[in-house]
Image (spheres, rainbow, N blue to C red):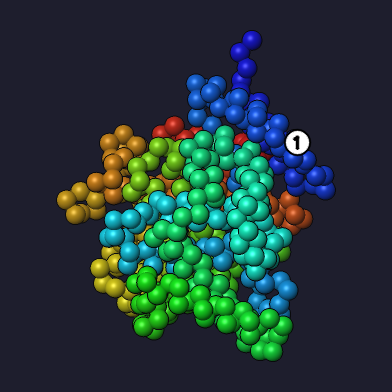
Amino acid sequence: MLVNWSYVVNELVWIIDKVSSTTYIIHSEDLKLAADILKEADWSVKHEERVMIRKALLLKLFQAAYMQRWNDKLRPVDLYELDKQGHKMTIAYFIGKFEENRNSFNWVEIIEGGIFELLQRIVLTDLKPPILYRIKEDSQKYQELNEWVCLQLEPYIQLFNNDLWQRFKDYLFDTEDNLNRRSLAAAHFYATSWEFAILERANPRGFEMDEIRRKLDSQQEKYYDLKGIQQLALHSKYRKFVDLCGELRFQIRWSHIHRVPKTSVMGHQLFVAIISYLLSLHLNACSRRRINNYFTGIFHDLPEVMTKDISSPIKGAVPGLDKLIGDIETDLMEREVYSLLPKKWRRQIRYFTEKEFTDFVIIDGKIQEVTSQQIVDSYNDDRYEPRDGTLIKAADDLAAFIEASVGIDNGSSSQELVDAKVQKRDKYKGVKIGNLDLSAIYADFN
């Protein structure tokens, strides 16, 4: 009898996710059995259809929206892991732009390193960072801890993309310091220091505060070999750009609705970016296409730092209002945001923030709008700098669907959330981009 491994293993992942979200404990023997089944299934799955991204992996990533940071300190505002990681990747882009012409720099490694570090942090959420750093000093124990992390995450990642799974394991166990890891570490440091500046004002004489400040100051010196960190120290306009991006951490989506967890614009951007990247992997997108899709996700709502998050019903309330708001955003971005960045970067940032849901390629230095299918068929090549606006819009809608769905599951009775969930799901019935069946992803949530 031919075993449908795709069905069997997907059901296994679903069961593990359901159990892990209850008070039951998954024993290591159970996870080992799951991992063995995944490995046995791998050959068969390769000879069947490509496995879609599953609900279990998406919800695992979304757990970061619940994870409070600095929760042993007095905080004037709640700080969440999803927002911190989004801010970190915004800063990583800034640092990376100064380093990208160096031979050892690789944007894909920056992006995937950010995703891998987020996943590791989701599993190790109970470990306070100073404790984790102490564990890292014992290389044997840290390796054993990462082996446990892999055991927790293998059922979520391995089936979706085995190559990604192998890169995740390599990233965790390869401790060699290189330019890409240092750029990410510097972005992590800067985002942490940015948060601490907020806490420091509320805890001027708090326990550990002086020690934390000393450690952060000493860490900054470690990254002065990176030009981006030097420039942030030298130029106030660059610090202002990072601050402006950081303000998106405080803008709450669906702010008029009781919803758990509440997600910020910054956290939403990161979630969209990661979904866009994973869907791009499914489509076998070239490197530049994956990079452009990811950073469009990271920056696609940046204009809202000027206008706040305006809901779709309001934008559609009056004919032409959506376009007028877009024109206002463009004008404010030109005067207040783009001017904070080096001139040679501004064209690319405009790609990410203006007409963010348009499919385009660049031919002979000129932007040419195309369809998503044309990108799949003819332009999936780095030399065309392709950007899948349709795919990013699908990721944006899927992120909104998950935010609404989880809010309802957690007790919100808002009809607006119910309507949003149904509208997003119905919008993608029968919709495909290449071999990506978007309706199947939504069906996984039914």
At a point 58% along the width and 82% down the height, the residue shown is 213
Q: Is residue 49 left or right of residue 336?
A: right
Of 229 and 194, nearer the camera is 229
Q: Which residue is mark 1?
A: 29
The image position of residue 48, as x and y in percent, is 51, 22
Secondary-structure class at tag 1:
helix
Q: Is residue 82 left or right of residue 337?
A: right
Q: Is residue 152 left or right of residue 329?
A: right
Q: Amino acid at mark 1?
A: Glu
User: Where, quadrant-wise, is the C terminus in this rendering?
Assistant: top right
Of 302 and 417, nearer the camera is 302
At a point 50% along the width and 60% down the height, the residue shown is 269
At a point 16% along the width and 51% down the height, the residue shown is 364
Q: Is residue 338 above or below residue 378?
A: below
User: Where, quadrant-wise, is the N terminus in this rendering?
Assistant: top right
The image position of residue 10, as x and y in percent, is 64, 32
- Residue 244 appears in the figure: no
At a point 45% along the width and 73% down the height, the residue shown is 222
Q: Is residue 298 above or below residue 442?
A: below
Of 198 and 402, nearer the camera is 198
